[in-house]
Image (cartoon, coloured by chain):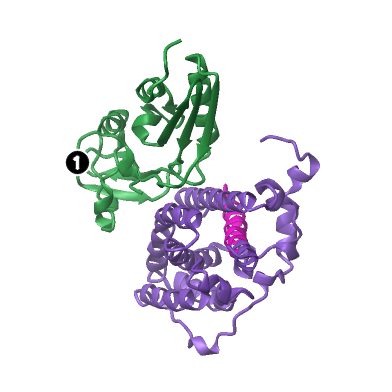
Chain colours: A purple, B green
Amino acid sequence: MSEEQAIALKELLYKIADDQLILGHRNSEWTGFGPLLEEDIAFSSMAQDKIGQSYALYQMLHHAGEQAPDTVAFMRHADQFHNCVLVELPNGEYDFSLIRHFLFDTAEALRFDMLTRSSFEPLADLAKKIKGELRYHTLHANTWIKQLGNATPESIARLQTSLNYALPYALGIFEPSPNENIIMDAGFFQGEASLQAEWQSRVISILEQTQLNLPDWKTVTPILGGRIGKHSQHLQPLLDEMSEVFKIDPTAEW
Amino acid sequence: MTTLSQEMILSWLEDVKDPEIPVLSLVDLGVIRGIDIAGNHVSIALTPTFVGCPALDMMKDEITSNLKGHGVEDVKISVTFREPWTSDMISEKGKIALKKFGLAPPPSQGLIDDIDVLEHAICPRCNGTHTELKNTFGPTLCRSIHYCLDCREAFEQFKPI
C-alpha cells in the first residue's frame, strides 16, 4: 500500500468510526428517558452496538499506527473529529431521534454492505459482521417510521417537521472526502456518490409506505463540513461530557 | 507433563460458559475459532458474538484462568473477525441447551432474510408458533423479546445473526 493510500484509508476509517461513536453516545442519552421501556432498551442497545463497532475500527487504526482507542476517543478536540454533523445534533424529542436513526442507519447499513467488498481485508471481514448487526437497527427504524408515519395527525406532522429539518444534515453524510478518488481506485470503498444514490432509493421506498413527503432532492442543500472537522456548536459539549471521567483519571477502570 | 492437544484444550474449555448464558459453553457457542499449541504455550483465537459484546473481556479472563488451572504456562488470546461469528456456529448441543434454559435457539441463517422468521419465533416453553415479536432488542445484545399467544408467556430468542 502506498503512503498516499494509507493516509486515505485512515481517513475513511476515522470518519466511519467517529460517526458510530458520536451517534452511539447520543443514543445512550436515551437510557432512562425512552418514551416507553422498549424504546429505552432499543436505543441503549444500539448505543452499545455502535460504540463497540467504533472501538473495533479504532483498534484497526491503532494497528495502523494511530493512538490507542481510548486516547483517540477521549482526547481529540471537536475539530479533529470526522463525523458528519447529523450525528452530533442533540437528541431533541423522540421524533427527531427516530428520523435521524432512520436516515443515518439506512446509509450505514448500505455502507457496511459495500465495505464487505473492500480490498482492505480486515475491513471487509469486520464489515461482514457489522452488516448483520445493523440489520436489526434498520429493522427497528423502518418498523417505527412505518408505524408512526401512518398513525395520528400529530405523529405524522411531528415526523414530517423532523424529516424536513434533518434532510440537509443527512445529505452531509455523503460529503466527499478529499481522498475520494484514491479510496475508490484502491478499492477500499465504492465512494460516497454511489452510496448516496442507493440511500436515496432506499429512503424513498420506505417513506412511500407512509404519509410522509420527501421534498424535491434538488431543493435540499447539504450541510457539509463535518468530514473536515467543521462542526456545529453541539459537538464540543458532547465530547466534554463523554471524556469527563477519562480526563480526571486516565487510568480509571469502570 | 503430557503433551497438550487441541482435543484436550477443547474439552477443558467446555467448562467455560458464556457469562450471560451460563448453560452454554464457549465451545458450543462457537466463539473459539482457533487453537495453536507450541509446547506449553497456547494461543486461542476468539471471535465476539456481537462487536460490542461487553462479556468479551470476561470470556478472555475465564479462558486464561481455566487453562492456567490445567497447568498451561502461557495463554495468549487474540480477537479475530477473520471468520465473523454467526448464530449458525452454535452447536446442536448448544441449541438444545438454550431451549432448556428457556431461550429460543436462533433459526438457521439461510432463513432470516425473511422477516417472518423474526416475527414468529417458536416458543421454547410450549413449542407454540403463534408468537409475536415485541422488541428486536432485549436484555443483552444477542436477545430479542417475544410473546407467545399459545401459552401467554413472554420469552426471549437468541437472535439469528
Q: Which residues are magenta?
A: A12-33
User: Is residue A19 located in the magenta-colored stretch of the structure?
Assistant: yes
**Horizontally, is A85 left or right of A199 in the view?**
right
Q: Residue at x 29, y 39 (%)?
A: B105
In the rendered view, tell whether residue A130 sits above or below residue A182. Answer: above
User: Is residue B89 located in the magenta-colored stretch of the structure?
Assistant: no
- Residue A154 visible at all: yes
Q: How many marks?
A: 1
**Horizontally, is B26 left or right of A96 in the view?**
left
Q: Which residue is mark 1?
A: B128
Place residue A152 in its image quadrant: bottom left
Q: Residue at x 46, y 77 (%)?
A: A194
Q: Residue at x 38, y 68 (%)?
A: A146
Q: Position of residue B109 (x, y in %)?
A: 28, 50
What residue occupies the far right of the structure in this picture? A248
What residue occupies the far top of the structure in this picture? B1
Q: Position of residue A102 (x, y in %)?
A: 47, 66
Q: Residue at x 62, y 63 (%)?
A: A6
